[in-house]
Amino acid sequence: MGKGGKSDRLSVEEENMPAWLVSTNTLKIQPFKLLPLGPYDVRVRMKVVGICSSDVHYLKTLRCAYFVVKEPMGIGYECAGVIKEILSNVKDLVPVDRVALEPGISCWRCTQCKIGRYNICSDMKIFATPPVHGSLANQVVHPVDLCFKLWVSIRFNKLRIWKEKRNPYRKPWEVEWM
């Protein structure tokens, strides 16, 4: 899960139990082996995961716009959790930090990414958008640059995360109290 969690990757480190969309109106909790951490990745224990309208479309029709679910796919989009593991290259976060995850993983190479507009990257890989798996799981592996530290005073059950679609120059995620 996470890191553009395509199902064709074979590297494994730890079993996980995500919610898989296996057919129309059918979810199953099934194991998934997490990828090992890369030098700038973190392992995050999920605390809250949002189900967005695209997840509902996939659940009901196995499609959303031109994306079609052709094999079992992990669902879950907006999410937040606690850092569980890092490697030595990660300097800004430590285990036990609370973070919100950007569900879109950009290429970091195109013109838009290089000028800081990664949220409109044309090669974006997005949680729960085929062939990428979602974040409704025990934990995910995710790039550290796409994990945003939350204030300690924010309780996970009071967190709401939404995507800012109107202004491509803003950071794509905002966090507020419910």
Image: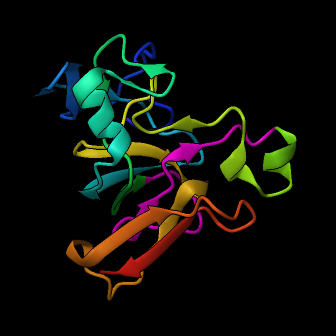
Extreme residue toward the bottom, this view: 153
Asked whether residue 32 is in view, the answer is no
Horizontal side of 24 relative to 84 (left or right) equals left
Residue visible at 19% across and 19% down in the picture: 24
Q: Magenta stretch containing residue 75, yes or no?
A: no
State which quadrant residue 75 falls in. Answer: top left
Residue 102's spot in the image, x, y percent? 51, 54
Residue 64's spot in the image, x, y percent? 42, 29
Residue visible at 64% across and 62% down in the picture: 166
Residue visible at 31% across and 24% down in the picture: 73
Q: Nearest the camera: 74 or 2?
A: 74
Which quadrant would the C terminus be assigned to in this image? bottom left
The stretch of residues the image draws in magenta is: 86-109
Q: Nearest the camera: 78 or 155?
A: 78
Q: Magenta stretch containing residue 108, yes or no?
A: yes
Task: Relative to 163, say whether 51 is above or below.
Answer: above
Which quadrant would the N terminus be assigned to in this image? top left
Residue 134's spot in the image, x, y percent? 36, 37
Name the image colouring. rainbow
Task: Relative to 47, say whether 177 is above or below.
Answer: below
Count of numbered circles in the view: 0
Residue 115's spot in the image, x, y percent? 86, 55
Secondary structure mostly seen in the magenta stretch: loop
Task: Relative to 100, say whether 49 is above or below.
Answer: above
